[in-house]
């Protein structure tokens, strides 16, 4: 029995160590980001004397609720008409096709160079559509917007000049990425928590990596590529679910520079239903694991500085933190009984296991910095930081089963289809997902019921801690019970 207890605490401690390493990495990125925000802003780049040929690519698949507003927004983009080409890469199989055809004909009649591109099949999913579009255009720069984005009219005018900052002897800029804004952040608790997490990536991680000279990533949309960079890096590939992260690493390993502009926002719609959110999370976490499997070796064989290789490793393995969280969570309930079994010699180790929340300490600094910057960039009043952080941490823990499964499938190399995230055309508190909702998976899968079981399991951990007067893991179990409760409740409600 003692051996079993030692193994239990050892595994828990290993997970705790991995989580602490992740937290410290985010803390260091926060320090770099704060330093960048405190520095004097760069002067605005000079407007080019001749604007480069630019193609706006809009990859679509069954986007009937948002496609018309997307086309209207892209038709309103300010750019020299003779240098602009809009490609609607439409792989749809529903009413989207007719909606696109009508809007494209309308804008063609007004003189806009816009094409409705239809492929015979959906080979390669989004990556395949983007690659196919490149064969049909002469654009030197390629802007990409997913269907749920609404770029401002001055987006191209603000972003394109940053490609002309390059030093004559330095690496050329291959990508300029912008920050994601949120069209429906206040729609529900679900969208508010997503915005809270995404803001941390766009307002701390990306600026921190840029300030430290580390690898960035194109976020799949809301950015502009130099066409020669795409081609030099080997083009779009569909062998991972995150074609954007994959190409980002291939390009930077080839020496291309990425720029990130937090001051420019590309507003987008957040998933409003749990199965849409889970679909997106599955694709992001599994795709990141697939990309890590594909590129980690090349990263460490590259001539990049050690710090850049280390940050790239944490970047690519970011999603693996869910595996550690899940294992640590499951082990935490038996740990409550360690003291009850009378293992006094393990008492110090048990106290160490109670330090789970301390490993999250650096994340408070990380998220607080993101919250501060979000307040700076946002016009609506921002709710309290402490409550949002507690709910976000709980909700992230509640997704650990779902996301850990995706990570493991990615690391094991198991292939799966690219399932797009449903977009429903929701703005702030307006409209309802009911009647517009369509599903990405079965109504209630076995995984959903297991999430409900885990909610009860961690609730049992709370009860055991109170009964045995062992309070060290009580805050952890409160977060886990709340998180799995939120995920299970919304899964039932949206089913």
Image (cartoon, grey):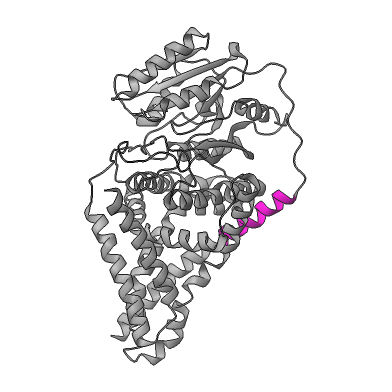
| Magenta stretch bounds | 24-38
When the figure is inspected, residue 231 is found, relative to residue 357, above or below; the finding is above
The vertical placement of 329 against 50, above or below, is: below
Q: Position of residue 377 (x, y in %)?
A: 63, 45
- Number of numbered discs present? 0
**Residue at figure coordinates x 29%, y 46% from the top left:** 414
Q: Position of residue 472 (x, y in %)?
A: 44, 80
Query: Is residue 56 within the magenta segment?
Result: no
Q: Is residue 84 left or right of residue 277?
A: right
Residue drawn at point x = 73 percent, y = 30 percent: 45
Picture quadrant where residue 147 is located: top left
Residue 317 shows in this picture: no
Q: Residue at x 45, y 32 (%)?
A: 146
266 versus 347 height, above or below: above
The residue at the far front in this view is: 430
Image coordinates of residue 63 in percent, x first then y, are: 37, 29
Identify which residue, 471 or 102, lies in the foreground. Answer: 102
Residue at the image point whose x is 34% and y is 85% from the top: 467
* Place of residue 359 in the rendered image (x, y in percent of width and height, measured from the top left): 51, 69
Is 26 contained in the magenta span? yes
Question: In the drawing, does residue 226 fall left or right of residue 411?
Answer: right
Q: Nearer the viewer, residue 284 or 61?
A: 61
What secondary structure is the magenta-colored segment mainly?
helix
Frontmost residue, 186 versus 302 = 186
């Amino acid at each position: 029995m003692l051996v079993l207890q030692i193994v239990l605490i050892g595994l828990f401690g290993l997970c705790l160590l991995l989580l602490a390493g992740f937290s410290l990495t985010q803390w260091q990125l926060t320090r770099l980001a704060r330093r960048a925000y405190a520095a004097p802003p760069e002067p605005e780049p000079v407007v080019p004397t001749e604007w480069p040929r630019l193609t706006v690519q809009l990859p679509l698949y069954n986007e009937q609720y948002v496609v018309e507003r997307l086309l209207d927004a892209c038709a309103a983009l300010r750019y020299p008409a003779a240098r602009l080409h809009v490609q609607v890469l439409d792989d749809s199989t529903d009413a989207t096709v007719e909606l696109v055809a009508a809007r494209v004909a309308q804008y063609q009649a007004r003189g806009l160079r816009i094409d409705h591109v239809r492929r015979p099949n959906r080979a390669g999913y989004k990556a395949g559509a983007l690659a196919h579009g490149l064969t049909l255009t002469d654009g030197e720069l390629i802007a990409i917007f997913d269907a749920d984005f609404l770029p401002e009219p001055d987006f191209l005018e603000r972003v394109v000049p940053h490609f002309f900052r390059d030093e004559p002897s330095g690496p050329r800029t291959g990508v300029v990425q912008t920050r994601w804004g949120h069209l429906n952040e206040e729609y529900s608790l679900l969208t508010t928590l997503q915005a809270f997490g995404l803001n941390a990536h766009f307002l701390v991680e990306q600026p921190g990596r840029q300030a430290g000279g580390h690898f960035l990533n194109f976020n799949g949309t809301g950015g502009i590529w130099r066409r020669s960079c795409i081609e030099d890096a080997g083009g779009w590939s569909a062998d991972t679910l995150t074609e954007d992260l994959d190409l980002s690493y291939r390009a930077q390993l080839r020496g291309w520079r990425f720029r990130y502009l937090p001051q420019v926002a590309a507003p987008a719609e957040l998933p409003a239903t749990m199965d849409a959110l889970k679909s997106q999370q599955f694709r992001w976490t599994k795709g990141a694991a697939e990309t890590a499997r594909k590129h980690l070796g090349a990263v460490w064989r590259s001539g990049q500085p050690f710090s850049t290789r280390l940050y790239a490793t944490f970047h690519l393995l970011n999603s693996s933190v869910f595996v550690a969280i899940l294992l640590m969570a499951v082990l935490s309930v038996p740990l409550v009984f360690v003291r009850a079994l009378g293992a006094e010699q393990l008492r110090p180790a048990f106290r160490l296991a109670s330090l789970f929340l301390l490993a999250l300490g650096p994340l408070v600094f990380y998220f607080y910095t993101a919250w501060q910057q979000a307040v700076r960039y946002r016009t609506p009043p921002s709710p309290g930081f402490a409550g949002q952080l507690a709910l976000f941490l709980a909700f992230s823990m509640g997704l650990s089963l779902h996301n850990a499964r995706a990570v493991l499938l990615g690391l094991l190399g198991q292939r799966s289809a690219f399932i797009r995230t449903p977009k429903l055309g929701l703005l702030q508190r307006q409209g309802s997902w009911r009647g517009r909702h369509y599903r990405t998976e079965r109504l209630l899968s076995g995984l959903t019921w297991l999430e409900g079981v885990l909610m009860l399991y961690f609730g049992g951990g709370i009860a055991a801690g109170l009964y045995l007067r062992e309070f060290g893991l009580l805050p952890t179990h409160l977060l886990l019970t709340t998180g799995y409760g939120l995920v299970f409740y919304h899964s039932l409600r949206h089913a």
